[in-house]
Image (tube, grey):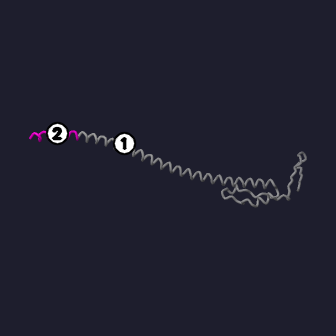
Amino acid sequence: MITSTRRVSPDKSEVRIAFSLEDTSDVKDVADLPQTFPDLEQRLQPVPPCVSLRESVQVYKEHCRMAREFHQVKHEIAAIEDRKRQLLAELVEDEKVAMEIARLEEEFRRLTEENRTLMTVHNERAQQLERLCLPNHTRQDSS
């Protein structure tokens, strides 16, 4: 353990800095962490720690954790945006189908009405023909 004590000025209290070169477990973990994160701008890349300072190593590890989390969130956002595009495309297709259904329903209604009118005209003409044929049958029967 190395300890250094300094007094910045006579009226200020002492500042004590202590660090150890013996416990290197944090330093070994740092070697396992990725050195760069392609998703991050250069200015946001984690700066390699001063391995002799535990706080520096901890800050570096936290920065790397946040960079990994940023990558994960960015990936999730991209996946959600892809799904949004798919849903919008489906919505457009559904709207086209709905418009086609409405058009077909209107055409069905119009054709049903036209059929009803034609059936009425047909029945009227059939009755008219029957009335016209009845006097002719009675004339033929009497002759």
Mark 2–mark 1 contact, CB under 8 Å?
A: no
Residue drawn at x 90%, y 45% is: 11
Identity of the residue furthest to the right in this view: 10
Is 2 or 79 nearer to us in this picture?
Answer: 79
Determine the CA span between mark 2 and mark 1: 37 Å
Identity of the residue furthest to the left in this view: 143
Residue at which label 2 appears:
134
Quarter assignment of residue 123 = top left
Q: Residue 59 carries which label?
A: none
Residue drawn at x 79%, y 60% is: 28
Residue 19 coordinates in the image, percent (x, y)? 85, 55
Residue drawn at x 86%, y 59% is: 22
Residue 92 coordinates in the image, percent (x, y)? 49, 49
Q: In this view, does 122 lie above or below 38?
A: above
Residue at which label 1 appears:
109
Magenta residue check for 21: no
Residue type beneath disc 2 = Leu
Name the element at disc 2.
helix
Residue range corresponding to the magenta coloring: 126-143
Quarter of the image containing the N terminus? bottom right
